[in-house]
Image: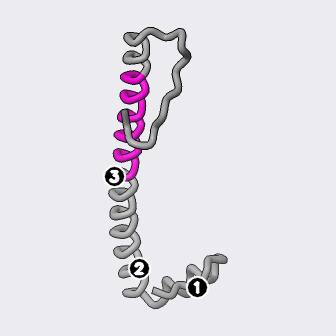
Amino acid sequence: MPDGIEIYFSASLAPGQREIVEQSIASAAERTRAEADAARERAVEEDKLHDAITARLAKLIRADPGVAEALEGVGMRPFRG
């Protein structure tokens, strides 16, 4: 069983049934853990991509002084790159 999980069984369950329940819960917990790990890894990669794109856009904006002024003119927040 995964750490931190406690299961209380009815006295009516046979030992074999208890084992099946424990295996099922352990399998579900492991699957959930793996899915959460994969989601965290995807989020890290998405953050890296976002940062790379943002850095390139900021570089382009800084290279053209008129762009920041134009962005402010269309209602965007001031660019402070």
Q: Reading the chain from its start, which is encountered first: label 1 or label 3?
A: 3
Which region is colored magenta? 22-41
As for residue 77 lying within the magenta part, the answer is: no
Cα–Cα span, label 3 and label 2: 26 Å
The amino acid sitting under disc 2 is Ala
Q: Amino acid at mark 3?
A: Glu
The Cα–Cα distance between marks 2 and 1, rounded to whole angstroms, is: 12 Å
The quarter of the rendered structure image containing the N terminus is top left
Residue behind mark 2: 58
Compare residues 12 and 49 and report the one nearer the observer: 12
Q: Is residue 31 magenta?
A: yes
Q: Residue at x 33, y 52 (%)?
A: 41
For residue 10, side relative to residue 35 (left or right): right
Quarter of the image for residue 60 reads bottom left
Q: Is residue 77 above or below residue 9?
A: below
The relative height of residue 30 versus residue 41 in the rendered view (above or below) is above
Position of residue 37 measured from the top left corner of the image (x, y, whole percent) = 35, 47
**Numbered badge on residue 41:** 3
**Would you say 5 lies left or right of 27 here?**
right
Residue at the spot 40% in from the left edge and 71% down from the top edge:
54
Residue under pointer 1: 78
Residue at left offset 38%, top offset 29%: 26
In the displayed image of the protein, which residue is found farthest to the bottom? 65
Q: Position of residue 8 (x, y in %)?
A: 53, 26
Q: Earlier in the sequence, mark 2 or mark 1?
A: 2
Q: Quadrant of the C terminus?
A: bottom left
- Amino acid bearing label 1: Pro
Q: Are marks 1 and 3 in contact (CB under 8 Å)?
A: no
Q: Main secondary structure of the magenta part?
A: helix
Out of 36 and 17, give the one closest to the viewer: 17
Q: Is residue 29 above or below residue 51?
A: above
- Residue nearer the viewer, 47 or 7: 7
